[in-house]
Image (spheres, rainbow, N blue to C red):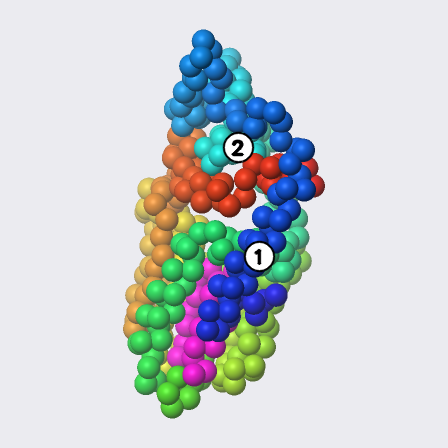
Amino acid sequence: MFDKVLLCSGGRNESALLKELSEVSKLIPQIAHLKGPTGGKTRGKKQGGKKNVVDLRTLLTLCAQAVAADDRRTANEFLKQIRQHATPTGDGMQRLAHYFADGLVARMAGSGTQIYTSLINMPTSAADVLKAYHIYLATCPFRKISHFFANKTIMNLSAKVTRLHIIDFGILYGFQWPCFLERLSSRPGGPPKLRITGIDLPCPGFRPSERVEETGRRLARYAETFKVPFEFNAIAQKWETITLEDLKINTNELVVVNCLFRFRNLLDETVMVNSPRNIVLNLIRKMNPAVFVLGILNGSYNAPFSLQDSVRRCFTILPYLTCLKPIFPEKFMRECFLRE
């Protein structure tokens, strides 16, 4: 499963992705009875032959403002309107509104922290994440393009070096690197000695570095398969506490810093003068890398919390949900929720 998803061997992965989607589409006729006679559409109600248009985006924003002001009566009125038109099996906007409304309810009830804590403490295996990642790659090109651009940049830069050190902030499961290792093994003149420093936030529990260390072992197996000299350094701690000595940088190696869509975990200078984001950026400056590959998402993730900003940030998810809708129709989505 890992090889089929993470390696890029002559287009075979694209065939595997198409096959995965084909298998999913075969399930849809089997659950047609789950869809009601109205087709399950709940975006608007017809009155006098006309369909009401509901602006869920505005309703969510107004509801978030009411919750922030602790105006429970107004918030409940907006929530009632949102519930009439939001559904976990509708289009992207309807699904987004459904789950964000759940979050607003938890916020008002004061149970949001407990729900979040229970969710992050639920163990999720790399194999389970990979299955979702497989479907995501088949549906949306965003992550695949980001990985291709980053890997191609690093490959071009390290075309003639003998020692390469990649420092990856937010490595998570390391899904970006198996394909890179495969490409590196076919480099003219042989692959360089590769060292990856995988940095991520600590996991809850007694083994905070478990996920990063598992990622290192997985990448070491790929490196052995492709005969790439490999070394992995796992760091699981708050990024602003990392020092230059922790990274073990050698003077005779090419240093590359990579961070795709994970800088949002760092608070910026609007929170404190010596902010975690500035500390990490200063650390990268001290590394003096040959290149710093940074992927970002539009949204004020690093700023102090506000419900209105949370609504705006949530709308960055909307394009992904919209991409999923044509491929996974409502009948299939409803079946997934019923299984859960």
Q: Quadrant of residue 245?
A: bottom left
The residue under label 1 is: 20
Depth check: give the residue in front, 97 or 210. Answer: 97
Q: Residue 262 at x, y = what percent? A: 43, 54
Camera sees residue 65: no
**Residue 107 shows which numbered tag?**
none
Along the viewing direction, whichever of 25 and 1 lies nearer the viewer: 25
Give the position of the N terminus as an image quadrant. bottom right
Residue 201 in picture, x, y percent from top left: 52, 57
Q: Is residue 159 visible?
A: yes
Residue at the image point whose x is 66% and y is 33% from the top:
34
Q: Amino acid at mark 1?
A: Glu
The image shows residue 214, relative to residue 108, as above or below, that is below
Disc 2, SS: loop
| Left or right of 198 in this view: 271 | left
Residue 185 on the magenta span: yes
| Residue 290 percent across, percent down from the top left | 30, 73
Residue lying at 32% horizontally and 65% vertically, measured from the top left: 292
Distance between mark 2 and mark 1 Cα atoms? 22 Å
The residue under label 2 is 90
Q: Mark 2 is on which residue type?
A: Gly
Q: How many labels sit on residues?
A: 2
- Which range is magenta? 164-186
- Judge whether 323 appears above or below 213 on screen: above
Within 10 Å of the Cα at label 2, are there few (<14), some (14-19), or many (20+) other Cα atoms?
many
**Who comes first in sequence, dot 2 or dot 1?**
1
Q: Furthest residue to the top?
A: 48
Q: Nearer the viewer, mark 2 or mark 1?
A: 1
Q: Is residue 315 magenta?
A: no
Percent position (x, y) of residue 96? Answer: 49, 34
